[in-house]
Image (spheres, rainbow, N blue to C red):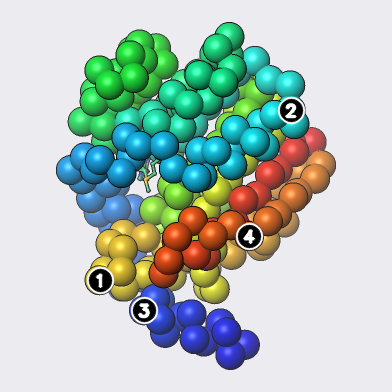
Amino acid sequence: MLRTRRLSRKYGLKPLERKLDQERQLARKFWADRPLEAYYEEIQPQTGLLIERLSQIEFNSIFEFGCNVGRNLYWIRKEYADVAVLGMDINESAIERGKDLFEFSGQELKVGDEEDLARLPTDGFDIVFTVSVLDHLPEIGATLNELLRIAAKRVMLLELVLPGDGLRLSDEIWPFSYSHNYTRAFNKLALKAIQERSVVLGEGPLSHYCLYELEPQ
Ligand SMILES: C[S@@+](CC[C@H](N)C(=O)[O-])C[C@H]1O[C@@H](n2cnc3c(N)ncnc32)[C@H](O)[C@@H]1O
């Protein structure tokens, strides 16, 4: 309880001040227009963690929702050359940069947001994953449902986990970022198994990540 209150204060967590739809639109606009950052072009420890976890699963196809320039997919494809990849991100400049930088085709990197997930086939990819994307959506229930529908074998979510549900982090810390109660959200889904482990990706908010691995039913 004390920890919850401390974290809540530290990251300035507060309820949404706007209606959910308006918040969603503003968050999408912010992430769609966000300038590119060199950080997303360089391999990071989280990419290595994903590759390590993938070594435990047989898979032929993989989809990253919120891929930015596709850095994770680039390194995954280096390790698994025959695997079909798809990355989707709301930021068009990131998608274009990823095509140039990592030589992805237009079929492999696409512009899209959570509403575009509906266009992807059921069980269309063996693995579906996100890295720090659901924490930029003010509400995640429908998106989780879609990610699970698209995944034939596993959904991996490496996401910021702070106390609270649908609360907004202080803009001074990270604009348009939100806390979610993942356990509660998973309880509403049809799952065969859930694995969970805490992951420290750095300092401050980066020390509060969790890798969830969900097996669809
Ligand atoms: C913290 S970055 C992580 C990028 C990438 N997953 C990685 O690990 O390099 C969050 C990404 O989510 C994308 N994003 C945010 N909201 C989105 C939405 N509604 N639909 C699709 N992508 C979104 C952003 O454009 C950004 O590229």
Residue 14 visible in the picture = no
> Tag on residue 12?
3
Q: Residues within 10 Å of mark 2 (few under 14, many from 20)?
A: few
Q: Are marks 1 and 3 in contact (CB under 8 Å)?
A: yes
Q: At label 3, which amino acid type do we have? A: Gly
Q: Are marks 3 and 4 in contact (CB under 8 Å)?
A: no
Q: CA distance from mark 3 to mark 2?
A: 39 Å
* Front one among 90 and 49: 49
Q: Are marks 2 and 1 in contact (CB under 8 Å)?
A: no
Residue under label 2: 57
Image quarter (top left, top right, bottom left or bottom right) of the C terminus = top right
* Front one among 23 and 72: 72
Q: Position of residue 78 (x, y in %)?
A: 50, 19
Q: CA distance from mark 3 to mark 4?
A: 22 Å
Residue under label 1: 172
Q: Are marks 3 and 2 in contact (CB under 8 Å)?
A: no
Q: Residues within 10 Å of mark 4 (few under 14, many from 20)?
A: some
Q: CA distance from mark 4 to mark 2?
A: 20 Å
Residue at position x 21%, y 31% in the image: 93
Residue under label 4: 198
Q: At label 1, which amino acid type do we have? A: Glu
> Of circles 3 and 4, which is in front?
4
